[in-house]
Image (cartoon, helix red, strand yellow):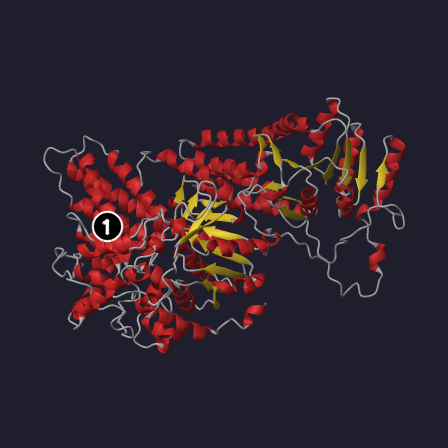
Amino acid sequence: MGIQNDLKAATSELIEYERRISGGRASISFRACVELFFRYATRENDDVPDFETLNKLFIARGHHFVANALKSRLGIAELGHSFVQDGMMILTHGRSEVVTGVLIRAAQSNKNFTVMVTEGRPEGSGFKAAERLTEAGIPVTVILDSAAAYFMERVDIVLLGAEGVVESGGIVNKIGTCQLAMVAKLYNKPLYVAAESYKFARLYPLTQADLEDNVDNDVEKPLFPPLLTGMEGGTATVKVEEGEGRHTQERGSSGTLLGRNTVFDSGPGVAAMTTKNPSCDYTPAQYISLLFTDLGILTPAAVSDELIKLYQ
Amino acid sequence: MGDDELSTSLSEMSLTGSRSLGGIGDDRPGSALSSSPASPGFVGKGTLRPKHKQQQSGASPTRVRKSSSPKSGKGGGGKASGGVKEDRNRGRDVSSGTTTSRNTPGGSSRCESERTQGHFSAGAKRQGPQSHRGARAESEDWGRHQAPSKMIHLFSHLPQYSKRSTQSKSDLHPAIETLGLLYADGSVRGSNARTAAMLLAFKEVVREYQLPPGEVLRLDLDKALKPHIQYLINCRPHSIAMGNAIKWLRGRIHSLDPEAGPAEAKESIVEAIDAYVEERITFAAKTLAEVTANKISDGDVVLVYGRSYSVELTLLRAKAQGKKFRVLVVDSRPLLEGRRLLASLSRASIPSTYLNLNAVSYVMRGVSKVLLGVAAMLSNGAVISRAGTAVVAMLARRFNIPAIFCCETYKFSDKVQLDSICWNEVGDPAELLRPAGGRGATRQVEQAHSLQEDKPGIAASELTASLPQRLKLLNIRYDLTPMKYVSLVITEVGMIPPTSVPVLLRESSKDDVNVNFEF
């Protein structure tokens, strides 16, 4: 019982730490992981007589966890890449290790396809994803987050990562995912989510408001930094061509990524403005076609089944 | 928020609430209960058996009955352990009332007029199934007089209301007889209350059961239970949850250790029943309420429909947690169950608004969550619940408001149903014509209602009798909400999407004994 309390304390400590470093909140997958480990710890507790063995078991379990995370990413790439076919245009949003894994695996199996990445405001994570993909030789187009509907008619599939997969089969992911999913649904484009099973969380949000700690109302933070200098008056999309020179130039121009927003700083009435900057949103299961996980290709409904098995 | 006009101040609400509360047990002055025991020591049947129908609402429609304690008949697992005892007390109240009423003159002549009305299914009901005890001939008359033209064709495969009989054929345990009468007159209502009361009554049966020499207990006990089960079903068709409990009990009996002595075996069944009621109903409802209450947040406007025990618990729990929220209680004729909920919410000082189902589309836009009770959760994700639930859930979906269903896992069924027709329950058609609320409402309310005032002294039955010959009445109790309108199912084991019902069924059946019975 003592170790349970220790673990509990460690859990809240860890979540607090994660909250601090990520600036605001602990990610859902992080919390799901911690809960899963805790679950394991409480369950295992009864069978083991002495503390030494228990200790070893726990540590081994921790390593197993980490190793599994890496392995499952490869497994997902193996399962998911067959959904990418020659000549496809794939839309993705934000940066996800699993998604890049799937796409790179598909490219390795000699499929020719193009990827469209939304820039992923405010931190511009889409650029990071685009960088990884271009390095792997995949043609990438970066578009504005708000241009998703404009390009949807040309897109064949939408492939997303997830920060957390919730019990309903829906996902919690970077802000903008939900609207993207809605547009995809409207255009009848299949939407796939690639996520490791440790991201499955026993949560059941019903509305966006159910995501706690989500909205960042800190006006001190630059909420809408300009991603690319000199974009005003220019085209909404920036082609990131293959080739180092062009690419670094784009990187250079996005160097101001996190700088202060000079356009909005100076205007009158700025102090009276309120800004809201939620970092993630909830996408209900109805917008998701399939989930690529290390447990296999799942329908959204199967997520809850797996969770029930996991926690029963 | 357009519903301000609809909202009634809390004080007014509590007034209405208490008024309606007074009449909860009122219903019909069940003459049938006359034969129910006057005390927990049961009187043999027939001692108080009425020769004929006594006065009913028809004879003295304006008569205000003293109702039994408001608590009695209050459904729910929470009260489960004391349920039967309370019910008995109730039975006593009512039966004493009947005794006096039987002495009222003119009883036999009324009987004549009733018989002439018998061919109206609606009129027939007024006599109530209870009156059939000891009036076998009369009940057969009913069967004949139930003109086919009065049946709704679509629902003709269901047991028709007037055919029900509380008449017992063989020697039944008094606890079962009492319960059957309470089922029939609607004083025990709601899945949780009915199932818990049934199991506790079965417990009494098992306890007092004597193994005949030369018989095997696990076979003979099951045989002995059968007429009891059948009797309860005759009184009112069993709900799916009750069917589950019966199935479980019979499975439990069949899997008894053949080596065990009769006393030991009986004791194990009694314990198992207690555990089932405690774990699957009482505790489940509490846990469920706790989980659901966490889903209610400050500033929520929660819409509920009718009165579901677990929903009521949830709201009270959320209030106890210090949440600030408002409740819209949607109610519907003929049972007007919502009034009881309203009374309980008012007692807990939860700001509430009371409205009828037909006003729901108007208030829905201001609602943030819809909480609904469940009679049975089917394995295709559909929900069977009190009639009207589907309308509320569909409307919620239309307004993008999450519809949350509260369901204990013992109500999960492996059945699949696509509409509300295959399985349903036909209620008393006369309820539809009764001015206000019929069984569920008080006489006071009935009096207040204009119909009665307009035509003083005219009973509902007489109104029915004057109706056109071709008029059919349909009073169904349940409806089916398809899966797409179910946002979330909250059970005692957590929150699940409706798609996961089969998974929970599978997981729970792992530890259960699986014996297939037809029920």
Tell me where residue B35 appears, x and y as whole percent: 17, 59
Which residue is rendered at x = 32% and y = 34% of the image?
A: B516
Q: What chain does mark 1 sit on?
A: B
Looking at the figure, which quarter contains the C terminus of chain B?
top left
| Quadrant in which the N terminus of chain B is drawn | bottom right
Pick whichever, A79 or B358, lies toward us: B358
Q: Is residue B123 left or right of residue B405?
A: left
Tally of numbered tags:
1
Residue at left offset 43%, top offset 72%: B13
Residue lying furthest top? A109
Task: Depth check: give the residue in front, A124 or B59.
Answer: B59
Residue under label 1? B201
- The 10 Å Cα crowd at callout 1, few under 14, some 14 to 19, many 20 or more, is many
Location of residue B120 in the rendering, given as x and y in whole percent from the top left corner: 31, 60
Q: Give the amino acid type for the residue marked by disc 1 in the picture.
A: Ala
Q: Residue at position x 25%, y 62% from top? A: B127
Where is residue A130 drawn, in percent x and y? 78, 36
Q: Nearer the viewer, residue B143 or B174?
A: B143
Judging depth in this view, the residue of B214 and A130 nearest the camera is B214
Q: Which of the 4 quarters of the picture holds residue A123?
A: top right
Rendered view: A93 above or below B334: above
Decide if residue B293 is in sight here. Answer: no
Residue most extreme to the left = B213
Looking at the rendered structure, the secondary structure element under dot 1 is helix
Camera sees residue A300: yes
Q: Locate residue A96 relative to residue B491 in the image: left or right.
A: right
Question: Is residue B450 shown above or below A120?
Answer: below
Residue A100 at what x, y percent from top left? 71, 32
